[in-house]
Image (cartoon, grey):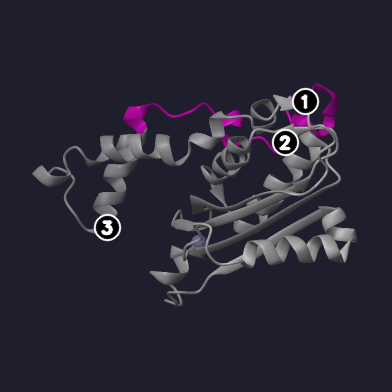
């Protein structure tokens, strides 16, 4: 490849989405692909009940994968510095999300808990939920999503610490493969004080484990 011999000509970062390297297919092409999958499943895409399905599926894709269109750094840019010295933990727990596993495109449904220890700067709490949303609305593995949420908050807010715990059920595991319903996967990423200070981490984990406050089963 040319990129290997003349790396200085590469202007985009290699981790950008495939959509950045190949032109986005047209809606008609996407709908044709859905018709192919319907035939692959064993059905007839021309029968009445399925005639509008490809159009509906592509529109659903626009919602399920809306996160590719949003830059979370830009979204978090508006921060507030008038905190009167507030330096205790800010915690948003039980943030429900729906994502899709990148191996099977099956739903991952769960909740995220986010905390940070501000240093001069805070962000509107709805933005914490939006960050989860932006990364959830992409094809994911839970480990990567956990890191992405923690890393972007760390980068933009530059707080004393960030903690992210995600618990979720993977429908590729509950509805196929090993068929194990009720199994939740838990991932976490601790940065700064949450990683280095056991007390801070313990306080966070105790707060997210507390019943009530609108918590619900995954
Ligand atoms: Zn999967």
Total labels: the figure holds 3
Q: Is tag 3's residue or tag 1's residue first in the polypeptide sequence? A: 1
Give SS at disc 2. loop
Give SS at disc 1. loop
**Considering only vertical position in the picture, is 69 above or below 132?**
above
Determine whether, in the image, residue 42 is placed left or right of residue 75.
left
Determine whether, in the image, residue 114 is placed left or right of residue 36.
right
> Pointer 1: what residue?
10
Determine whether, in the image, residue 140 is placed left or right of residue 188.
left
Q: Residue at x 57, y 51 (%)?
A: 140
Tell whether label 2 touches label 1 (CB within 8 Å).
yes
Q: Nearer the viewer, residue 135 or 131?
A: 131
**Considering only vertical position in the picture, is 90 above or below 189?**
above
> What is the C-alpha distance between the residues marked 3 and 1?
41 Å
**Image location (x, y in percent) of residue 124:** 64, 33
The crowd level at tag 3 (other Cα within 10 Å; few <14, some 14-19, many 20+) is: few
The answer to whether the beta carbon of the residue marked 2 is less than 8 Å from any atom of ligand 1 is no
Which residue extends farthest front?
A: 84
Determine whether, in the image, residue 191 is placed left or right of residue 107.
right
> Pointer 3: what residue?
41
Q: Nearer the viewer, residue 102 or 213?
A: 213
Residue 141, by quadrant, is bottom right
> Pointer 2: what residue?
14
Which corner quadrant holds the N terminus? top right
């Amino acid at each position: 490849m040319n990129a290997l011999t003349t790396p200085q000509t590469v202007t985009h970062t290699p981790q950008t989405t495939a959509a950045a390297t190949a032109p986005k297919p047209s809606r008609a092409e996407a709908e044709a692909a859905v018709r192919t999958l319907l035939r692959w499943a064993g059905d007839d895409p021309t029968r009445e009940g399925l005639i509008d399905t490809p159009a509906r599926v592509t529109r659903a894709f626009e919602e399920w994968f809306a996160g590719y269109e949003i830059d979370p750094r830009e979204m978090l840019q508006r921060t507030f510095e008038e905190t009167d010295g507030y330096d205790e933990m800010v915690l948003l727990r039980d943030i429900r999300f729906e994502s899709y596993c990148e191996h099977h495109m099956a739903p991952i449904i769960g909740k995220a808990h986010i905390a940070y220890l501000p240093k001069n700067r805070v962000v509107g709490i709805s933005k914490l939920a939006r960050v989860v949303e932006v990364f959830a609305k992409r094809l994911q593995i839970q480990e990567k999503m956990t890191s992405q949420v923690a890393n972007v908050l760390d980068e933009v807010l530059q707080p004393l610490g960030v903690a992210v715990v995600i618990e979720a059920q993977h429908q590729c595991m509950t509805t196929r493969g090993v068929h194990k319903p009720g199994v939740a996967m838990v991932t976490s990423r601790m940065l700064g004080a949450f990683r280095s200070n056991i007390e801070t981490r313990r306080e966070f984990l105790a707060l997210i484990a507390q019943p009530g406050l609108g918590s619900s089963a995954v």
